[in-house]
Image: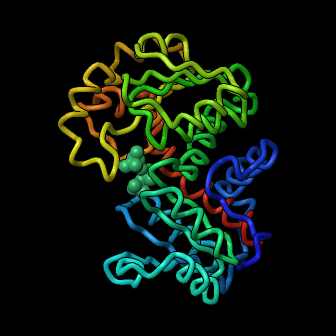
C-alpha cells in the first residue's frame, strides 16, 4: 500500500486549530498577492474527479492551479474508466504515478477515504454527502475578512435548513474553532450523528427546531438548498418538510445588527432564501464564492510545497 505519510484534506478535522487559522491567513495573503507569486506549482498537476456537477469547485481549482503555474485535469465518470467501475485502489495508484494531487467530488464519503488510503499523493475532498470542507475554508475566510482580526471573539453562527454536508461542515468548524453554532433543522433531517456529538463535546452547539430561536442575536445566518445533489427524487417531499425554514428579511431581523448572510451556492431564490436576503446588503455570497479560489490556492500550496 502507498505511504500514509502524505497529507490529505478529507474533512476540516484533518487540520488542527492553528493549522486552520494559518491556512486562512495564507488565503488572505494569496488574495492580496503577497503569497503564491512566481509560479510555485510550476509543472505540478491536480487531477479533478467529479462524480457530481460543479461550477465553483471545478473552476476555482482549475483556475487556481493555472495561476500557481500548474495545471488541473478535469475527469468525469462519463469518459474515464472510473465511470465504468475501475476500483478506487487502482485509480488512486495509477493517478499517483502521473499527477501531484487528486481532488474528488463524489457521493459516499467512504469512497474518498478509500481513494486516500491507496493514494501516495494528497487527496482533497471537493464535496461528499457527508462534508464540504473546501467550502468552509472560503466561508471562514469571508468572515475573517468581514469582521476583522477579532472575528472569532464571541462569534455566533446560525444554520437554518437541512442537516446536510454543509451543516456537518459548520459543525466541524465550530468544533475546531470553538464558536457558538445554533442549527434549526426539521425533525428527520438532523446532521450526521457522530459529527454532531463531536462538535457538542468541543463547542457551544444547539440543535433546535425553530429558525427564530436559532437566529436570535447571531452574527452569521447561513443555509443551503433543501435537496442536495443525489436527492432530486425527494425534492417535492423536502419542499413540504422545509416550508417553515426559509431565510427571509423577517428572520434576518432577529439576528444581530451586524449579521451577515452566507450561502455556498447554487441558491434557490424563493425556496431556502428569499431574493431580498440573498441579493440584499447583508449577503456576502459573491465574496464567499470568490474566496473559494484564494482559500484553495492556499490549500494547494500548503499540501504541495
Ligand atoms: N459551492 C459549491 O461547491 O459550488 P459548485 O457545486 O458549483 O462547485
Ligand atoms: N448541499 C449541496 C451543496 C452544493 C455545493 C449539495 O450537496 O448538493
Choose top left, top right, bottom left or bottom right for residue 250: top left
Residue at horizontal 42 percent and vertical 68 percent from the top: 50
Q: Tell me where residue 295 appears, x and y as whole percent.
A: 62, 54
Residue at horizontal 33 percent and vertical 52 percent from the top: 229
Above or below residue 73? Residue 163 is: above
Above or below residue 262? Residue 45 is: below
Instruction: Tell me the quarter of the image containing the N terminus.
Output: bottom right
Q: Nearer the viewer, residue 237 or 62?
A: 237
Q: Is residue 238 left or right of residue 144?
A: left
Above or below residue 157? Residue 298 is: below
Q: Nearer the viewer, residue 232 or 275?
A: 232
Q: Is residue 153 left or right of residue 252?
A: right
Q: Tell me where residue 104 appears, x and y as whole percent.
A: 51, 66
Instruction: Tell me the quarter of the image containing the C terminus.
Output: bottom right
Residue at horizontal 38 percent and vertical 60 percent from the top: 55
Protein image colouring: rainbow
Q: Quadrant of ligand 1?
A: bottom left
Residue at horizontal 73 percent and vertical 72 percent from the top: 304
Amino acid at each position: 500500500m502507498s505511504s500514509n505519510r502524505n497529507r490529505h484534506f478529507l474533512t476540516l478535522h484533518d487540520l488542527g486549530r492553528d493549522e486552520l487559522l494559518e491556512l486562512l491567513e495564507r488565503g488572505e495573503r494569496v488574495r492580496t498577492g503577497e503569497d503564491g507569486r512566481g509560479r510555485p506549482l510550476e509543472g505540478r498537476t491536480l487531477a479533478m474527479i467529479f462524480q457530481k456537477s460543479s461550477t465553483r469547485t471545478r473552476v476555482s481549482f482549475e483556475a487556481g492551479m493555472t495561476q500557481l503555474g500548474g495545471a488541473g485535469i478535469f475527469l468525469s465518470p462519463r469518459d474515464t474508466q472510473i465511470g465504468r467501475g475501475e476500483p478506487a485502489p487502482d485509480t488512486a495508484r495509477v493517478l499517483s504515478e502521473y499527477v501531484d494531487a487528486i481532488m474528488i467530488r463524489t457521493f459516499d464519503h467512504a469512497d474518498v477515504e478509500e481513494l486516500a488510503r491507496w493514494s501516495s499523493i494528497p487527496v482533497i475532498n471537493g464535496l461528499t454527502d457527508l462534508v464540504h470542507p473546501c467550502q468552509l475554508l472560503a466561508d471562514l475566510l469571508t468572515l475573517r475578512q468581514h469582521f476583522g482580526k477579532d472575528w472569532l471573539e464571541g462569534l455566533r453562527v446560525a444554520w437554518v435548513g437541512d442537516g446536510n454536508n454543509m451543516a456537518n461542515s459548520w459543525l466541524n468548524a465550530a468544533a475546531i474553532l470553538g464558536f457558538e453554532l445554533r442549527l434549526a433543522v426539521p425533525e428527520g433531517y438532523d446532521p450526521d450523528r457522530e459529527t454532531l456529538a463531536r462538535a457538542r463535546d468541543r463547542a457551544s452547539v444547539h440543535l433546535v427546531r425553530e429558525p427564530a430561536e436559532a437566529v436570535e442575536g447571531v452574527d452569521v445566518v447561513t443555509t443551503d438548498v433543501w435537496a442536495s445533489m443525489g436527492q432530486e427524487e425527494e425534492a417535492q417531499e423536502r419542499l413540504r418538510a422545509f416550508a417553515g425554514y426559509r431565510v427571509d428579511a423577517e428572520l434576518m431581523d432577529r439576528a444581530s445588527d451586524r449579521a451577515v448572510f452566507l450561502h455556498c451556492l447554487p441558491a434557490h431564490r424563493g425556496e431556502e432564501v428569499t431574493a431580498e436576503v440573498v441579493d440584499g446588503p447583508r449577503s456576502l455570497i459573491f465574496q464567499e464564492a470568490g474566496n473559494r479560489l484564494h482559500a484553495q490556492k492556499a490549500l494547494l500550496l500548503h499540501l504541495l510545497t
